[in-house]
Amino acid sequence: MLDVSQDQETLLEVNNIEVIYNHVILVLKGVSLRVPKGGITALLGGNGAGKSTTLKSISNLLQSERGEVTKGMVSYRGERVDQTDPAEMVRRGVVQVMEGRHCFEHLTVEENLMTGAYTRTDGRAAIENNLEMVYSYFPRLKERRKSLAGYTSGGEQQMCALGRALMSQPETILLDEPSMGLAPLMVEKIFEVIREISSSGVTIFLVEQNARLALESSNRAYVMESGELTMEGDSQELLRSSKVRESYLGELNS
């Protein structure tokens, strides 16, 4: 795992944002965080804490759900991006893997993967090389490449969604609940690949309910409750925190 220090370049910054849905429902309340270049930064919290909304504020997918950033700002590489078109965010190298996989069920696995390359202009050979890289991470996808995605397992669909993100040659991946609904062995495989992707130089901002898994896999982490950040710090330090252990790991303090 990469060593991400406080002195490392800040790639993504969320500064005091407020998010409202349907003009009346306040979901995020003054959220500020930074994601340094390289490594894995995790955002933890229970159901309804606002974790997915935070990711969508960055990728600019809020509008499709009648949400908007009403205060504060999001910046990427020092430039404000919270009013940027989602496709432009992909061109800048920021790709979100949505909760629940969201594969195109009527397309084959390989066709799904190729949709991730739609913004690229570097030619067919480079895209084919990327496709082989994805298959090296996920050999199972190569075996199922001609199968309709809708007829693959949940784990295979998660692999497909992550592989599709990799096809865009991202600098940063926003990863939403990759372990959700998967068997333990599949979760282990997915996170093994996530760590490999991070080691290759891709920055990962990870939202995950499995606190132990997220903290063991990440360099730095934030904890969110009811739309506000309540803790932040080195992941290993948070893993040892009595509050985190009691509230998120199900361990009682003696």
Image (cartoon, grey):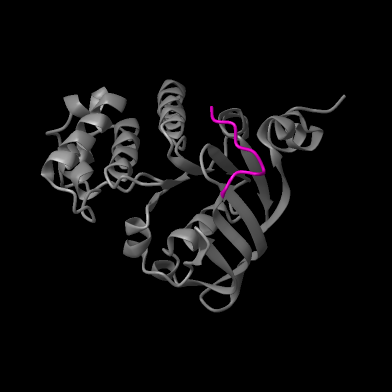
Would you say residue 162 is visible in this rendering? yes
> What span is colored magenta in the figure?
1-9
* Left or right relative to 144: residue 68: right
State the image coordinates of residue 222 (x, y, percent, origin top left): 66, 46
Work out which residue is located at the far bottom of the displayed protein and give it: 23
Q: Is residue 71 positioned above or below 4 on the image?
A: below
State the image coordinates of residue 83 (x, y, percent, origin top left): 45, 72
> Is residue 98 shown in magenta?
no
Residue at 35% across, 37% down = 158
State the image coordinates of residue 146 (x, y, percent, origin top left): 11, 34
State the image coordinates of residue 252 (x, y, percent, origin top left): 80, 28
- Give the image quarter of residue 196: top left
Would you say residue 177 is visible in this rendering? no
Main secondary structure type of the part rendered in magenta = loop
Residue at 54% across, 30% down = 2
Work out which residue is located at the far top of the displayed protein and give it: 185
